[in-house]
Structure formats: C-alpha cells, structure tokens
Amino acid sequence: MAKYKPKNILITGAAGFIASHVANRLIRNYPEYRIIVLDKLAYCSNFKNLDPSRSFPNFKFVKGDVCSADLVKYILDTENIDTIMHFAAQTHVDNSFGNSFEFIKNNVYGTCVLLEACKVFGKIKRFVHVSTDEVYGETDENATVGNHEASQLLPTNPYSASKAGAEMLVMAYGRSYGLPVIITRGNNVYGPHQFPEKLVPKFILLAMKGKPLPIHGDGSNVRSYLYCEDVAEAFEIVLHRGEVGHVYNVGTDEEKRVLDVATDICRLFSLDPSETIKFVENRPFNDQRYFLDTQKLKKLGWSERTKWEKGLRKTMEWYVRNFDWWGDVSAALLPHPRMLSCHVTEKDHPNAGQNSDQGQMGCDEKETTSVPKSRL
C-alpha cells in the first residue's frame, strides 16, 4: 500500500490536548509539510500547548471556530489545504449532561460545516475524523473480545451521541460525495497538557494540594488509558497508511478501574488511599466498561510503547513542574464540573488574540492569522 504524502494539513482543535501533541509531532518530524492549526481557544485549549512548534517555519496558527463556514472556506482556499485532521470537539461527559446543546453545536454542526466546505472546495485528499470509543456504548463486563470497527454504535450520553452523529455525517459525505474520509475511535488518553477536568490530571492536581480524590459511584467503572505520545504516533500512522473509507480503533488491552487510577496516584504522592479517596454521587449514567479490538491499527504498524506506570509518572512530573499551566482551575477540580468560561490565553501570548485594522493578527504571518472581517 502506497504511503500517503500530504502537503498542506489543517488540524482543527490544535491547541487542545491530543491535537497539540499530534501537531507538534508532525511539525517536528515533517518539515516539508505545512501545518495550519485552527483553534478558537476555548476553556480547555491553550496556545502554550503549541509552544514547541512556534519557531518552525512550517507552522501557522489561525484563531477561529470550525462552526464559521466563511472562515473554514477561506482557510481551505488560501492555504490550498489537501488534508484535514479534525480534532475540534467538546469532549467532557460531565459537561454534556449539563450543556448538551453546546455539544451538538460544536461536535455535529461544526463537523457538518467542515464537511460541506470540503465538498465545495473539492481538493481534499484525506479527511481524518477523530471520534471516541464511547460511540460503541458499554462493553459487557465479561467480554473477552473488544468492540471492532464494524460493531454497532450505541452511545449512552449526550457527548458520545454527538460524536456518533458526527461520524454518521462523515460517512455520508464519504459515500455521497466521494470525500476521502478516515475515522478513528480512541480509548482515554492522558499525559502532559491535558485540561484537569479529566480524571488523571484532576486527581494529580488534587493530590498535589492534599485534597480528596472524588470518585463517581463505587469506582468499579473500567477504562483503558493510552499515553499521549503513543496516540500521536497512531495518528501519524493513520495519516500516512490508513485506507480511505475505513475506521481504526486506537486503544490498549490494559484496563484500569477508576479506583485503581486513584490508588496509583495516591501512591505517587505517598498518600493513604483510604484517607484520600472520597466516593461521590455518580453521573446520571456511567458506562461500566469500554473495550476495543485494535488489531486493524496494529496491522498498519502501530503498537503501544508507554506502559501505564511509566506514563503516569511522566505525567505527574510534568504537572508538578507546570502546576500553573492553566491558571485557576478550581472549578474543574469539583466532583461534578460544568462548562467553564472561555480560557484566556492572550495573557501568555498577547499576539494570539489581537486583530489589526486589516483583520490580520498582530504577530508574524506564519504564526497566526485570521479571516478578513469582511468575510465573517
């Protein structure tokens, strides 16, 4: 199978957690690729996540929203985009229970805007859509074989339902319009730069403060965790070797109960789990287990490299060094957080959010730009 070679890649949601690791990896490893990264800099994204790439000549940042059709069309046209890696999404299940409309808007409508722009543009050679293992719904507790790429989609919460809906649109545009789409469905990811509404960074920051670690329900829910750099490598492989029209599970066979995760983090900080862990009210619905069959991706040449113990320690060490990366995150550390207000990153990077009279950002062109005001 011939290796796909992109020229101009648009990565959406690139100041977020997973996408920033993918963007930084591609920018570093492939200087011949131009990487245009798009992000609206919402509460869970941070321009600092892209610091490793800012000095590279093949990097360009655009501050904006995938829900803006004019902006998306402008970027595709002016940057001559041939490849899209679509990460932009609202992703936190707790937030989706309290703000489902926002999830539908960002995850479904935003994806539709992007697809429609690609259809009209007519020059896209790869569209990699990033989905989640949660679209499969619960895996039976006694199952010995994980969900494979052709398994039925049975989402159980507003977040996973919005991601399943987005997938349906992606597949429809692939079949009806011949858009060259590829879909990935991934397990939980952890590592540096993750906003602390998610379990691992939340527990690490709480443990650093000597505060209780709140566990929903009885802590028996099982999840699989992949280290961020392993996931970035998976996307690198899917981009170059993935087949158009196919779905790829990105996951690990190693599973952890939420209680086990909390206990492991307590041990890293020499805390007594029996005194530190606190059981709180469960979510309205909390899937017991997700389990993926990842043989299809492994046949492309990918394998997990970072074991849980090593990855968790590296993650802990990063947060200890960068405890103030996100500023005040006290609202995210609550047992049941809700959508936070927009995270302001301009304090750290003043040029990331300032328009000149011409509608261009105030810093170097290769680093950041915006669509002319007349098109918004």
Image: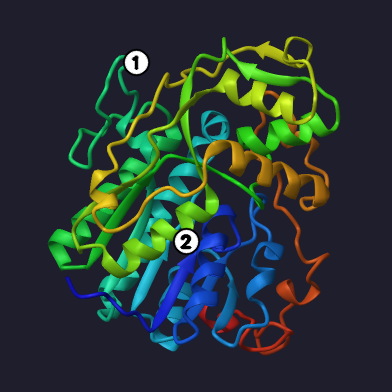
**C-alpha span from label 2 to label 1:** 38 Å
Residue name at image x 31 percent, y 80 percent: 5
Residue name at image x 49 percent, y 72 percent: 26
Q: Quadrant of the N terminus?
A: bottom left
Residue name at image x 76 percent, y 35 percent: 331
From what the image shows, is residue 68 above or below residue 4? above
Residues 60 and 234: in front is 234
User: Around disc 1, counting alpha carbons within 10 Å, would you say few (fewer than 14), some (14 to 19), or many (20 or more)?
Assistant: few
From what the image shows, is residue 35 above or below residue 68? below
Q: Secondary structure at mark 1?
A: loop
From what the image shows, is residue 224 above or below residue 114? above
By what rule are the colours in the image chosen? rainbow
Residue 218 is situated, as x and y percent measured from the top left of the image, at 57, 10
Residues 78 and 291: in front is 291
Q: Quadrant of residue 374?
A: bottom right
Q: Is residue 13 visible?
A: no
* Residue designated by label 2: 67
User: Would residue 122 appear left or right of 7 to someone viewing this image?
Assistant: left
Q: Is residue 9 visible?
A: yes
User: Would residue 79 appear left or right of 201 to someone viewing this image?
Assistant: left
* Residue designated by label 1: 141
Residue 333 tag number: none
Residue 115 is situated, as x and y percent measured from the top left of the image, at 32, 64
Residue name at image x 43 percent, y 44 percent: 104
From what the image shows, is residue 368 above or below residue 108? below
Mark 2 is on which residue type?
Answer: Cys
Whichever of labels 2 and 1 marks the residue nearer the N terminus, that label is 2
Q: Are marks 2 and 1 in contact (CB under 8 Å)?
A: no
Q: Secondary structure at mark 2?
A: loop
Residues 161 and 292: in front is 292
